[in-house]
Amino acid sequence: MTERINKNTAKYALENSAKSIIVSASCFFAATCGVSIISKIDMIGSICTLISRGALISMVVVITMLPAFLMVFDKIICKTTKRTRHADIKY
């Protein structure tokens, strides 16, 4: 029962937040990529390229791996957090 609730909750959260995560990461990627292309200083261009790749990688990790980790470690998180209550979620 709890596993089904966790899966449904993770799916609901991902469906509602994935669009904003993608938009945010894409804007950050475009801005840093633009700076790396325009910059005439090699060091700044290299750092901005590195940051833009990091934005894409973190977007993929947040969308794919973070919900899975939160589902797997839900019991540990609840036990180690002070004053935690499980929400009564109805599906």
Image (spheres, rainbow, N blue to C red):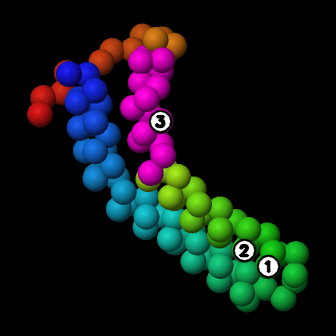
52 over 60 or under it: above or below: below
Q: Is residue 48 left or right of residue 34?
A: right
Image location of residue 32, percent across then percent down: 66, 74
User: Which quadrant is home to the N terminus?
Assistant: top left
Mark 2 surroundings within 10 Å by alpha-carbon count, few (fewer than 14), some (14 through 19), many (20 or more)? some
Labels 1 and 2 touching (C-beta < 8 A): yes
Label 3, on which residue? 69
Magenta segment includes 71 = yes
Q: Which residues lie in the magenta part?
A: 64-78
Q: Identify the residue shown where x is 29% and y is 31%.
A: 6
State the residue in front, 24 or 46.
Answer: 46
Mark 1 surroundings within 10 Å by alpha-carbon count, few (fewer than 14), some (14 through 19), many (20 or more)? some
Q: CA distance from mark 3 to mark 2?
A: 28 Å
Of the image marks 3 and 1, the number of the one nearer the N terminus: 1
1 over 53 or under it: above or below: above
User: Which quadrant is home to the C terminus?
Assistant: top left
Label 2, on which residue? 49
State the residue in front, 14 or 3.
Answer: 3
